[in-house]
Image: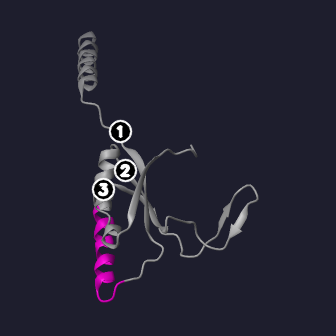
Amino acid sequence: MKRIIFMLMAVMLAIGSFAQNAPAKTATRQFMLIVRFRSDFVPPAGDTIAKNIKAWQDYMGELGKAGKIVSGFRPANNGETISGTTQTTKPSPYIANNELVSSFLIINAKDMNEARVIAKKCPVFEFNGSVEIREIQNTAN
């Protein structure tokens, strides 16, 4: 009996030492991709829009298959903006530098470099849009 207990302890000790020597798993961080397009954007004629929609479907599908997408949202075109100490309300979404938020995605990436690679594949660039990358932290927990 003592021999079995000794063997079990030796095995557990060996497993513990191997586990400590295992390479550390890279922590995944979350990033927000804020997708913007020109507020004066005029959709092109022909099948260009259909091709862009297909590019978005492929892009989102690839992110899903790779486990990179956490969530994504596309705000409605209408909205309100409240600003300043007087809380002035303007009956339209916020537009800065002639750009309007089109959508935003929450992605998993190991670092800003990987988030940048993911962002650069975004189909919004086909229509001269932009993507802002911001690391986020969950402040609700």
Of pointers 2 and 1, the one earlier in the residue sequence? 1
Name the one closer to the observer, 70 or 22: 70
Residue lying furthest top in this view? 2
Name the one closer to the observer, 3 or 115: 115
Residue kind at label 3, given as amino acid type: Ile
Q: Which residue is mark 2?
A: 108
Quadrant in the picture for residue 26: top left
Residue lying furthest right in this view? 86
Question: How far is mark 3 from mark 1, CA to CA?
Answer: 17 Å
Residue kind at label 1, given as amino acid type: Ala
| SS state under label 1 | loop
Q: Position of residue 4 (x, y in %)?
A: 25, 16
Residue 2 within the segment the image draws in magenta = no
- Please determine whether, in this image, residue 118 is positioned above or below residue 125: above
Q: Which residue is mark 1?
A: 27
Q: Which residue is mark 3?
A: 118
**Which secondary structure is most common in the magenta stretch?**
helix
Asked if residue 131 lies left or right of residue 18, the reply is right
Q: Position of residue 69 (x, y in %)?
A: 37, 57
x 35%, y 38%: residue:
27
Asked if residue 44 lies left or right of residue 40, the reply is left
x 30%, y 89%: residue:
46
Give the residues in magenta.
Answer: 44-62
Residue lying furthest bottom in this view? 46
Q: Are marks 3 and 2 in contact (CB under 8 Å)?
A: no
- Please determine whether, in this image, residue 106 is positioned above or below residue 141: below
x 23%, y 15%: residue:
7
Of pointers 3 and 1, the one earlier in the residue sequence? 1
The label number, if any, that marks residue 45 in the structure image: none
Residue kind at label 2, given as amino acid type: Asn
